[in-house]
């Protein structure tokens, strides 16, 4: 059983099913509350029948600062998926997909051009998951992560910047078919 | 609903909350119907409102309509539209639809049911449960989804369900489906042992015979207490057999990685939970105040820990199992090993407030030695609160203002207010201070000056927000959850937190020593002010601690040792404030406030000493050593109460000596009868401290003796002959690698006990 609703701060006391999982990062309180304060409709949770949080997604709406307006890396008004997680006990129920769809609806409601997210280049499961939802690789951010998830001898790992166009992007101007060929440095990513 | 039609359901959900709380079921019904009838862009039913919560409210509202028949026809018709399209939606929604069907079968008036039952037991609602189970038996959530429904069934239905229908659904018991359904059957059997309707009361005297047990189990027909021990034993035997069956069949083992969860984890959990109940922890739940393992059978408890620990080695990522073991090892007095299990959970930053009590609550009373590491044990918690609460304004609230997120503002302010009143926050301060004092360290601040708790006043309502969400939840609502059985004592509470703060405050007063280079020019004036401050402060502590301790609910929030310790706080603060204010030259008999405090304090110290020195209850099967190793909490309370008494005596005597030196007339200082009583109290407290020292010395000697592994295995399984005669002990040995397999575990338990006693050897028992 699950209910989907907007996050509220008390949910932080019910995060254990998600955040005790070794693959889920726990942030400082201010980080969660910043998202709740600025983009409450993009912070959605799934709760079980006992009120435990079994999944959540945090996102934001933004564009690059005006100073970058003429940069090739300028990002127009878009939604960004900052974190999405589902408790191990609640996986394989499509909760991640539903949470992402909630965020996409909010992105459309806020007239965003696209939704984007970063994923480790070795995280093939996540990449396949996002591709199944209509996301494609827009560019490769070289050495974005300061560690490597599968090879302890390496000190960095690339990120794929994946995007899905929203309703506003009628002409699909903000996605690429050959995104794998577009490499950028971490400092180019705002 | 306009907002909802735009894809925003926030207001809709809020409206449902309001309708339900105000019993406005017509409005709730109409809103749910409207939400569930919404179509998406393709003209298909929209799943925006198809949450379980909406279905549940819709069905509840239908049952309250004046004409439920019409309402349920509508519910079923809407459900049908979802069923026709469910093939294309996420598993989550399919499950919600299946559960809504199930919920309908439970809430629909009986007159409206078309009975297609094969028998009296296979009722329409049981048929729905079986259909759900058949479709979802391999889902991790199947048990949780059905749990509430199964506990609503009549006894006849439940018996038919677990004894007839599940085996029927399972078919061949050797297949993976058969095994998964067997695991579910055992989980339901365990659940049903926690439901009162599976027991029937028997008269205390029947056929002229006194009946030892108050119930007869309707499943196994044996005389029973609650829960039925015979049923628990049968569940263990069956779970062990299933566990072995899985491990023995390579194709089952090969299939496990593709399952939601290793079924052996569920089986080990079941075995562990049944053993915990058999150990007597269930009875303890009715009185969490008593010493942790009093009246507990050590063999069942140790067997439970062994089975669960063996399973954790196989599935180290299961956080529920890990947390359960953390609590169990704390209960066993193995704090250092519990910490080894706790650390990999990596509880940090925001989740510390809700999760830290699971390890740190009362930890200084169990294992002060843990605080001797290179990094202060509670540093992460202190850093978190210091950083998060440094501004008086709720964190990030200005972001909400500037973004126009006005609905977020109130929630953020409430969360901030709650965090500043958190029992975990107080726990951080109190545990740090207790450990520092125990190890003879210096406290840089008085508790009142600690910025974390400086704003907490005696009437602040403190809040416990401990998150038990990851614990196994196999009990019915009629039985306490497992975390309540295995916690060292009652959960954090406002009353306990305040009493701990007041005790810290008392210690600050009675142990205060002015800096050596402090030489006030007007010594008389300063002494008079200091005296007035002490009288006032002690009177305040006495007043506040008395009010809290004498509240009728407070005893239920404390262990018996804590109750005695905080009673000592009440009495010492009252005794000191009265003694400081009593004229030395008074020829009247000592006022009752003093004499009764002294006598009550003597009784309190005697009670604590008795609790410490009395061996395990006869017939519990515990040895003195086991009882002592698992009750360091009482040892800590004896030490704290005795030292507080000695500090108080020293404080009063020091004041008396200063007054005598200052005023040679003989009019100032302490009344001679008070002095005599204080000296007597000091003697009693010294004896209590000698008991503490003696206990630590004895435990050190005992743990230094040889043969410990055999002894521990003997406590767990009995002698080898006893093990052979005990079906449960044999079964436990079978899933934990036998005695030889358990040796490594026994070594870890022993090592942790040794660590703990070693830490206690560094605890100060002198002023």
Image (cartoon, rainbow, N blue to C red):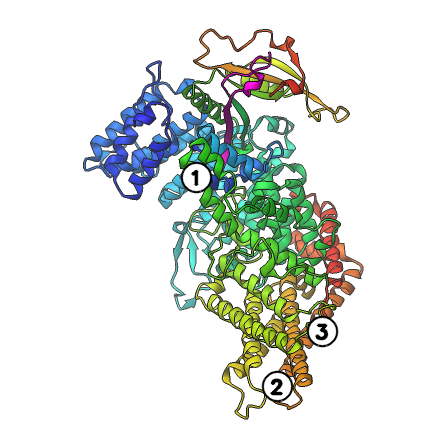
Q: Chain of mark 3?
A: B
Report whether mark 2 lies on the same chain as mark 3.
yes
Q: From the image, state whether disc 2 or disc 1 is nearer to you.
A: 2
CA distance for labels 3 and 1: 56 Å
- Residue at 68% from the left image edge and 63% from the top image edge: B437
Residue ID for mark 2: B668
Q: Secondary structure at mark 2?
A: loop
Foreground residue among B52 and B239: B52
- In this view, B712 is above or below B40: below
Chain on which label 1 sits: B
| Relative height, residue B759 to residue A65 (above, below) | below
Which tag, 2 or 1, sits closer to the chain's start? Answer: 1
Is B110 on the left or on the right of B323, as rendered? Answer: left
Q: How far is the residue under mark 2 from the one under mark 1? A: 58 Å
Q: According to the image, label 1 marks what residue?
A: B409
What is the chain identity of the residue bearing mark 2?
B
Bounds of the magenta segment:
A50-78
Say whether residue B412 is magenta: no
Q: How many marks?
A: 3
Residue carrying label 3: B690
């Amino acid at each position: 059983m699950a209910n989907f609703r907007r996050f509220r701060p008390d949910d932080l006391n019910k995060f254990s099913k998600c955040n005790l999982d070794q693959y889920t990062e726990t942030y400082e309180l201010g980080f969660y509350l910043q998202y709740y304060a600025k983009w409450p409709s993009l912070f959605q949770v799934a709760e079980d029948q006992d009120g435990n949080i079994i999944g959540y997604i945090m996102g934001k709406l933004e564009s690059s600062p005006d100073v970058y307006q003429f940069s090739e890396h300028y990002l127009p008004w878009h939604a960004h998926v900052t974190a999405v997680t589902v408790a191990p006990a609640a996986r394989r129920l499509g909760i991640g997909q539903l949470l992402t769809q909630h965020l996409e609806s909010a992105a459309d409601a806020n007239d965003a051009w696209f939704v984007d997210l970063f994923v480790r280049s070795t995280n093939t499961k996540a990449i396949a998951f996002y591709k199944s939802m209509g996301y494609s690789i827009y560019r490769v951010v070289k050495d974005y992560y300061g560690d490597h998830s599968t090879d302890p001898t390496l000190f960095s790992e690339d990120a794929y910047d994946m995007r899905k166009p929203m309703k506003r992007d009628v002409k699909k101007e903000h996605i690429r078919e050959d995104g794998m060929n577009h490499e950028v440095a971490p400092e180019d990513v705002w | 609903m306009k907002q909802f039609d735009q894809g925003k359901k926030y207001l809709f959900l809020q409206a449902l909350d309001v309708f339900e709380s105000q019993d406005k079921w017509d409005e709730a019904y109409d809103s749910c119907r409207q939400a569930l009838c919404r179509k998406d862009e393709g003209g298909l039913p929209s799943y925006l409102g198809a949450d379980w919560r909406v279905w549940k409210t819709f069905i509840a509202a239908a049952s309250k309509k004046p004409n439920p028949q019409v309402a349920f026809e509508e519910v079923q018709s809407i459900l049908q539209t979802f069923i026709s399209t469910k093939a294309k939606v996420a598993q989550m929604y399919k499950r919600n639809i299946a559960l809504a069907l199930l919920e309908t079968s439970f809430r629909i008036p009986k007159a409206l049911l078309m009975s297609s039952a094969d028998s009296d037991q296979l009722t329409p609602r049981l048929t729905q449960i079986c259909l759900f189970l058949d479709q979802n038996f391999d889902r991790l959530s199947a048990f949780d989804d059905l749990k509430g429904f199964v506990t609503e069934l009549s006894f006849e239905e439940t018996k038919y369900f677990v004894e007839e229908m599940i085996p029927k659904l399972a078919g061949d018991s050797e297949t993976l489906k058969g095994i998964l359904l067997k695991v579910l059957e055992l989980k339901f059997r365990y659940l049903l042992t926690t439901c009162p309707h599976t027991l029937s009361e028997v008269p205390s005297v029947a056929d002229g015979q006194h009946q030892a047990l108050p119930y007869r189990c309707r499943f196994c027909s044996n005389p029973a207490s609650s829960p039925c021990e015979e049923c628990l034993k049968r569940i263990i035997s069956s779970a062990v057999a299933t566990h072995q069956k899985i491990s023995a069949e390579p194709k089952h083992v090969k299939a496990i990685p593709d399952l939601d969860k290793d079924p052996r984890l569920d089986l080990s959990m079941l075995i562990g939970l049944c053993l915990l109940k058999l150990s007597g922890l269930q009875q303890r739940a009715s009185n969490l105040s008593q010493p942790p393992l009093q009246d507990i059978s050590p063999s069942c408890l140790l067997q439970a820990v062994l089975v669960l620990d063996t399973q954790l080695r196989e599935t180290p990522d299961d956080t529920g199992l890990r947390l359960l073991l953390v609590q169990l090892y704390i209960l066993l007095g193995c704090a250092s090993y519990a910490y080894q299990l706790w650390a990999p959970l990596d509880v940090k930053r925001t989740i510390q407030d809700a999760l830290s009590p699971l390890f740190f609550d009362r930890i200084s009373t169990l294992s002060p030695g843990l605080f001797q590491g290179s990094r202060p044990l509670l540093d992460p918690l202190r850093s978190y609160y210091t950083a998060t609460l440094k501004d008086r304004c709720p964190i990030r609230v200005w972001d909400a203002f500037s973004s126009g997120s006005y609905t977020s503002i109130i929630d953020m302010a409430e969360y901030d207010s709650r965090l500043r009143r958190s029992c975990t926050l107080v726990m951080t301060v109190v545990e740090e201070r207790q450990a520092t004092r125990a190890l003879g360290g210096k406290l840089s601040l008085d508790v009142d000056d600690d910025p974390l708790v400086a704003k907490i006043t005696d009437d602040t309502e403190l809040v416990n927000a401990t998150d038990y969400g990851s614990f196994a939840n196999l009990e019915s609502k009629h039985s306490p959850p497992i975390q309540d059985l295995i916690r060292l004592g009652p959960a954090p509470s406002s009353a306990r937190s305040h009493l701990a703060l007041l005790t810290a405050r008392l210690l600050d007063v009675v142990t205060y020593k002015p800096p050596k280079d402090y030489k006030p020019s007007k010594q008389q004036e300063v002494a008079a002010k200091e005296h007035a401050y002490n009288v006032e402060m002690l009177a305040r502590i006495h007043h506040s601690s008395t009010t809290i301790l004498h509240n009728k609910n407070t005893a239920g929030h404390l262990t018996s040792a804590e109750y005695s310790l905080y009673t000592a706080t009440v009495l010492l603060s009252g005794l000191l404030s009265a003694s400081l204010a009593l004229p030395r030259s008074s020829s009247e008999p000592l006022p009752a406030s003093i004499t009764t405090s002294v006598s009550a304090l003597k009784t309190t110290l005697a009670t604590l000493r008795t609790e410490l020195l009395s061996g395990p209850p006869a017939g519990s099967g515990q040895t003195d050593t086991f009882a002592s190793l698992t009750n360091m909490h009482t040892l800590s309370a004896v030490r704290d109460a005795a030292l507080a008494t000695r500090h108080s005596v020293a404080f009063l005597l020091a004041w008396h000596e200063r007054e005598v030196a200052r005023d040679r007339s003989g009019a100032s200082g302490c009344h001679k009868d008070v002095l005599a009583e204080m000296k007597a109290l000091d003697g009693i407290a010294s004896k209590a401290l000698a008991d503490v020292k003696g206990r630590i010395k004895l435990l050190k000697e005992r743990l230094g003796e040889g043969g410990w592994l055999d002894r521990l295995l003997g406590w767990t399984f009995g002698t080898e002959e006893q093990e052979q005669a005990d079906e449960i002990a044999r079964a436990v040995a079978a899933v934990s690698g036998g005695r030889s397999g358990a040796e490594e575990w026994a070594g870890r338990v022993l090592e942790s006990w040794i660590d703990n006693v070693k830490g206690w050897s560094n605890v100060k028992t002198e002023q």
